[in-house]
Image: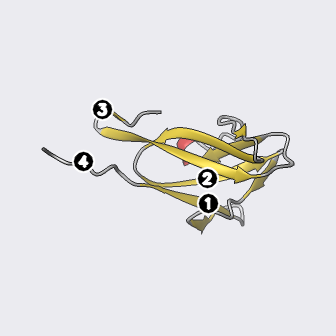
Amino acid sequence: MIPGVSGEREWLPATVACQAPGAHEVFLAGDFNDWQPRATPMVRQPDGRWTVTLPLHPGRHEYRFIVDGRWEDDPQAAGSVPNPFGGCNSVLEVRPIARVRA
């Protein structure tokens, strides 16, 4: 995906990876897709990781993986925050691209 601008807000490509080599299916749910558990399927890679690249606005985003129907944390996340269900949401920080003026 290519970085772009939609109205006043910038969109940037963000890739998320999940280590789940034995999984049959993995999805990504978060504030960017209204926490819909099956809205963002991930793709199995030859090394057993599951990945997805999606356009996100710069800023902090909360997410979790759904691995074979189970909600799971991302142990590789930069951070986590408590959620209202007694668990934690993983945190992804999307930073804007620095622009150089000629």
What kind of element bears circle 3?
A: loop
Q: Which residue is mark 3?
A: 7
Q: CA distance from mark 3 to mark 1?
A: 28 Å
Lower position in the chain sequence, tag 2 or tag 3: 3
Give, as a three-letter code, the residue at label 2: Tyr
Tell whether 17 sits left or right of 61. Answer: right
Q: CA distance from mark 4 to mark 3?
A: 18 Å
Lower position in the chain sequence, tag 2 or tag 1: 2
What kind of element bears circle 1?
A: strand
Counting every numbered tag in the picture gives: 4
Residue 86 rendering spot, x and y as whole percentages: 72, 66
Q: Which residue is mark 1?
A: 90
Q: Are marks 2 and 4 in contact (CB under 8 Å)?
A: no
> Which residue is located at x 71 percent, y 65 percent?
87
Lower position in the chain sequence, tag 4 or tag 1: 1
Q: Which residue is mark 4?
A: 99
Q: Are marks 2 and 1 in contact (CB under 8 Å)?
A: yes
Q: Residue furthest front?
A: 46
- Which quadrant is home to the C terminus? top left
Lower position in the chain sequence, tag 2 or tag 4: 2
Q: Nearer the viewer, mark 2 or mark 4?
A: 4
> Where is 16 relative to 89, above or below?
above
Residue 25 rendering spot, x and y as whole percentages: 80, 39
Q: CA distance from mark 4 to mark 1?
A: 28 Å
Q: CA distance from mark 2 to mark 1?
A: 5 Å
Label 4, residues with CA under 10 Å away: few <14, some 14-19, many ≥20: few
